[in-house]
Amino acid sequence: MNDDHTEHEHAGYDVYVLAWVALLILTAVTVTVAGLHLGKLSVLTAVVIAAVKASLVLYFFMHLKYEKPLFRTMVFVTLGVLVIFIGLTFTDILYR
């Protein structure tokens, strides 16, 4: 049986543990920032931290790091459009 799939060398457990620790630290930062009551910056800060956490999950745990460049580009363009729509929604709500 001939498969067109090629085996990639995936990262070792140390990379996954470091990504997990980074996610834990970012979660702690999110909780800390939520308690600071930054006003209008609270939402922006939470969204930026969530985007960084989502990027870590996509890149390492969902193996986006090992995908072809075209697929990675399609994922990032889709996420970029989503960010634009969410940003425009927040802008509308902010200036009501």
Image (cartoon, grey):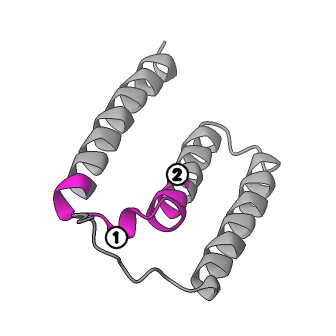
Side of 58 where 53 appears, left or right: right
Side of 73 where 93 appears, left or right: right
Q: CA distance from mark 2 to mark 1?
A: 24 Å
Q: Nearer the viewer, residue 62 or 3?
A: 3
Residue occupied by mark 1? 66
Secondary structure found at label 1: helix
Q: Earlier in the sequence, mark 2 or mark 1?
A: 2
> Residue at left 19%, top 63%?
69
Q: Is residue 24 above or below residue 94?
A: below
Indicate yes or no whether the magenta region holds residue 70: yes
**Which label was assigned to residue 48?**
2
Quadrant holding the N terminus: bottom left
Mark 1: amino acid: Tyr
Number of the front mark, 2 or 1 = 1
Q: Position of residue 7 (x, y in %)?
A: 34, 76
User: Which SS type dominates the magenta stretch?
Assistant: helix
> Residue at left 38%, top 37%?
83
Q: Which residues are magenta?
A: 54-71
Q: Nearer the viewer, residue 41 or 51?
A: 51
> Residue at left 52%, top 64%?
56
Residue placed furthest toward the left = 70
Mark 2: amino acid: Val
**Which label was assigned to residue 79?**
none
Do callouts 2 and 1 mark residues in contact (Cβ within 8 Å)? Answer: no
Side of 50 where 27 appears, left or right: right
Q: Position of residue 41 (x, y in %)?
A: 59, 44
Q: Nearer the viewer, residue 71 or 92?
A: 71
> Residue at left 62%, top 46%?
46
Indicate yes or no whether the magenta region holds residue 56: yes
Residue placed furthest toward the front = 1
